[in-house]
Image (tube, helix red, strand yellow):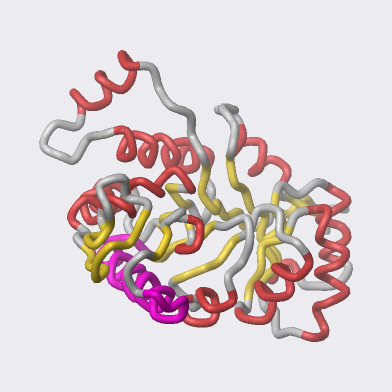
Amino acid sequence: MPKIVPLATRALGGEPGIPDLATLAAWVADHRGTAADLTAYRLDVSLAPELSAGIMFPCAGGLFCRDRIRESLAGLNPDRDMVVGDIHVDAGALVEDATLLAAQKREVWCALPAPHTLGIRDRYYGDEDEWCDAIIAAYRTLMRAMRDAGIGGHVLIGDTVDEREISILAGKKVFFFAPAPAQTDLVLLMEYQRQVAVSKSMLGRAIELANEYEIQRWIIMDPDKEGIRLILSHFDPDQVIAGGYCTGEDDTYWKKLEDRAVYVK
């Protein structure tokens, strides 16, 4: 008799909306004694529905953490969009964020914008390689500080993939994710990582490229029956994960992902 078997599920972050003032004020009142601000609120509400839905590998955060990172970097101008001095990290607020998240689930992951998506222009180093090395070093420092506070690892999100960043930062604790990668970005993701997140529309091309790279784990974003059937015709179920990245206000998004993440054995 056919048996319905669940796939593992993994969150790669999300982009929760801006709450009204009354909702934010109530949340802040419930979190006195912590760095309770808008970013902390959005981190909290991005994680809660993942946990309630039973996502196996949850991940709070998203591109909305951009301002938090820029505020954590010394050496920027007052508008936080230009480098005017040596980059240094003050990870205090990020450590508080990590502590808040780890209190809900130890070793939870956190999604952040990739360095090149911060929108910071160099007006100090005067050399692209030196500036890239400086911001990458800053990311290493802030991510280590968050891991020391209980975060398990980081997803770095970008519309495109920067080869210098991924070649230096990608590893067991850092995963690069492009929600809608061009083919050149997909190639970089597969070249520098042993696991890759792909949309249903890119799945066929990714499978075609599989023989050229050492991909050990496939994260299929928002999979449907056809996508799951296709990936399982090429790879074993323990190599496949159903992934999600919630960009809307659908409170049932993660529960729906859990419900779809099955196959018939």
237 or 101: nearer the viewer:
101
Give left or right: position of 71 versus 181. Answer: left
Give the x, y percent position of residue 114. 49, 61
Give left or right: position of 163 versus 44. Answer: right
Give left or right: position of 230 versus 186. Answer: right
Above or below residue 244? Residue 17 is above
174 or 51: nearer the viewer:
174
Give the x, y percent position of residue 33. 11, 37
Above or below residue 174? Residue 248 is above
Queried whether the magenta region covers residue 187, the answer comes back as no
* Magenta: main secondary structure: helix
Above or below residue 74? Residue 124 is below
Q: In the rendered structure, which segment of residues is drawn in magenta? A: 126-152
Report if residue 52 is visible in the image.
yes
Q: Quadrant of residue 29?
A: top left
Q: Residue furthest left?
A: 33
Residue at 26 percent of width and 34 percent of height: 37
Residue at 43 percent of width and 47 percent of height: 61
User: How many marks can you see?
Assistant: 0
Give the x, y percent position of residue 143. 33, 66
Image quarter (top left, top right, bottom left or bottom right) of the C terminus: bottom right
Residue at 88 percent of width and 67 percent of height: 233
Residue at 32 percent of width and 33 percent of height: 38
Report if residue 6 is visible in the image.
no
Q: Quadrant of residue 22?
A: top left
Give the x, y percent position of residue 140. 34, 73
Q: Residue furthest top?
A: 22
